[in-house]
Image (cartoon, rainbow, N blue to C red):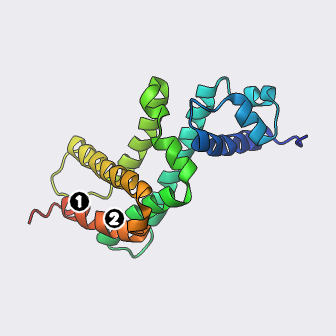
Amino acid sequence: MTSRLPAATRRQQLVQVATDTFGDTGFHATSMNDVAAAAGVTKPVLYQHFSSKEDLFEAVLRHVGNQLRMLLEAAASAEGLTPRQQVERGFAAYFAFLRDHRASARVLFGEARRTDESIAAEADRAVESIADFVATLIEIEDLDEPARKVLANGIVGLAEGAGRFWARNRHQMSADELAALTAELAWSGLRGDHR
């Protein structure tokens, strides 16, 4: 039997357990019973915090998106970095997240995103938040906000696509090596250098 935790602490614990559970078995294959059992609570306790599996999964997506954005911001905003180093550190943090938080990455980029409209919208909000941060790193002069957002989403797509391939073929290079390669590719675009 689990001890009584403050509601906010319990909710956070349930979100973390659900992240691991959904990441391991997928959204569709995971039941509320599975999450409750993994968390060591009864299903009614789970339903005190989340009205449905979709509600829980959306909370997980918000958590994972915030976690990833905070890691990216911390990596790219460290003092004394050149703009080039900011870009490379951001990619390194992203690929390290994929390596170290596999369940979270599967939740954010997994099958539920493609099959459920409300979940896709929440996942898109998480990715858009990351793109908003990336947009602050783009240094092309005279670039209007809509164009900046398009480019930022392109950079996020570059990282996501490279990360998906790398996750299936990790033996080919380390997260840092992949970060250096993608930063090199992205750098001229971020600087507006067209050589």
Residue 23's place in the image compared with 33, above or below, is below
Count of numbered badges drawn on the protein: 2
Residue 18's place in the image compared with 119, above or below, is below
Residue at 36% from the left image edge and 66% from the top image edge: 179
Label 2 Cα crowd, 10 Å radius (few <14 / some 14-19 / many 20+): many
Residue at 76% from the left image edge and 27% from the top image edge: 48
Residue 62 position by quadrant: top right
Q: Which image quarter is the C terminus in? A: bottom left
Which residue position is annotated with label 2? 87
Q: Which image quarter is the N terminus in? A: top right
Q: Earlier in the sequence, mark 2 or mark 1?
A: 2
Q: Give, as a three-letter code, the residue at label 2.
A: Val
Residue 190 position by quadrant: bottom left
Q: Give, as a three-letter code, the residue at label 1.
A: Leu
Residue 192 in view, yes or no: yes
Disc number at residue 146? none
Residue 30's place in the image compared with 105, above or below, is above
What is the C-alpha distance between the residues marked 2 and 1? 9 Å
Residue 50 position by quadrant: top right
Residue 164's place in the image compared with 107, above or below, is below
Residue at 33% from the left image edge and 70% from the top image edge: 180
The secondary structure type at the circle numbered 1 is helix
Front-most of 25 and 6?
Answer: 25
Which residue position is annotated with label 1? 190
Label 1 Cα crowd, 10 Å radius (few <14 / some 14-19 / many 20+): many
The secondary structure type at the circle numbered 2 is helix
- Horizontal placement of 74 versus 45: left or right? left
Are discs 2 and 1 less than 8 Å apart at CB?
A: yes
Residue at 44% from the left image edge and 56% from the top image edge: 167
